[in-house]
Image (tube, rainbow, N blue to C red):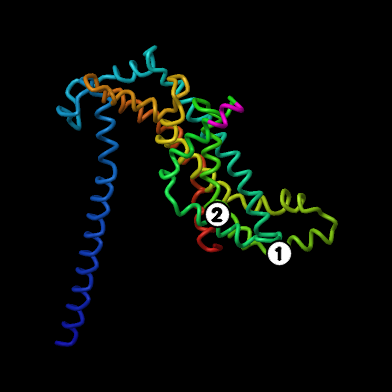
Amino acid sequence: MSSTLSVKELRSSKKRQKRLGIALRLLLAVFLILFSIFPVLWIVSASLNPSDSLSTQRLIPANASLSNYRELLTSPTFPFTTWLWNSIKIASTTTILSVSITTLAAYAFSRFRFSQRNNLLRAILLIQVFPSLLAIVAVFLLISEIGSVVPRFGLDTHAGLILVYLGGAMGINIWLMKGFFDSIPRDIDESAMVDGASHWQIFTRLLLPLMRPILVVIAILSFIGTYGDFIMARILLKSTEQYTLMVGLFIFTSNQFAQQWGVFAAGALLGALPIMIVYILLQDQIVGGLTQGAVKG
């Protein structure tokens, strides 16, 4: 009888411990969700607060309105839509060119054997070790000199900024994509060559469809990194019409006596919409690419 009671008590104790563990995990999950979502709610609240002051900011503003959004979209002094379009154009162009060049380079490093191949790969990785901030002065002088010869790629041009982004984004991406290429069996290439396919046909018709998950991941990371960059765009772009969104939003908070925090918050929320749309549309490919890369790489 006593042994039966002890077994029941042990089972009930295990059930209580299990319920306690579930409750603790739920509390931790709720805390983490609130901790991560609080800054977003605060920005939303600031965008609805017409006072343009963070010192009196509350999570639920007393006299909430859309005045900050109206000022942001209708002000002739600050062309928000132009800045947004500039950021989308620069990020999209950089992403397309970066992914295209990176894919070709990774295919060459993975499938071809040539002199100094390993040394070039190590050099690409070594260059990525140094922070890009160390090269700001050199990049500025380089783009200035290029602009004196080819004005289209000089200072205060989107083409010059895209050129800088392309140089800094391909290093680590080449390594990531090369690892993915290496995971694809060479038997596919050899069987296609037996049937008379060229290297270009093998690359475009056989390997690229298999590379779609990692291509989507690299494209999204490149787009987000370029879209949200501030330092390079601030240094290389001078005129208001050429500003990207991040540089343009900086204007609202840079004035010492008229800092427009409400308009800045509204612009930050509207500026985040392209990134949200990209994530929503490509979330399945993002998860697939990351998991396949983790397994294959």
Query: According to the image, label 1 marks what residue?
Result: 186
Give the position of the N terminus as an image quadrant. bottom left
Residue 193 on image: x %, y %: 81, 59
Q: Secondary structure at mark 1?
A: loop
Locate residue 92: give its quadrant: top right
Amino acid type for the residue under numbered disc 1: Arg
Q: Nearer the viewer, residue 117 or 95?
A: 117
User: Is residue 105 toward the left or the right of residue 275 in the image?
Assistant: right
Q: Is residue 92 magenta?
A: no
Residue 157, image x and y in percent? 52, 26
Residue at label 2? 124
Q: Residues within 10 Å of mark 2 (few under 14, many from 20)?
A: some
Picture layout, residue 83 above or below residue 231: above
Task: Work out which residue is located at the far top of the displayed protein and give it.
Answer: 76
Residue found at x 58% / y 48%: 215
Give the Cα distance between marks 2 and 1: 24 Å
Judging depth in this view, the residue of 156 and 35 nearest the camera is 156
Question: What kind of secondary structure does the magenta stretch mostly adopt?
Answer: helix
Q: At 55% from the left edge and 54% from the top edge, which residue is drawn?
A: 124
Label 1: how many Cα within 10 Å (few below 14, some 14–19, many 20+): few
> Which region of the structure is painted magenta?
145-150
Q: Which mark is residue 58?
A: none
- Residue type (three-letter) at the residue carrying disc 2: Ile
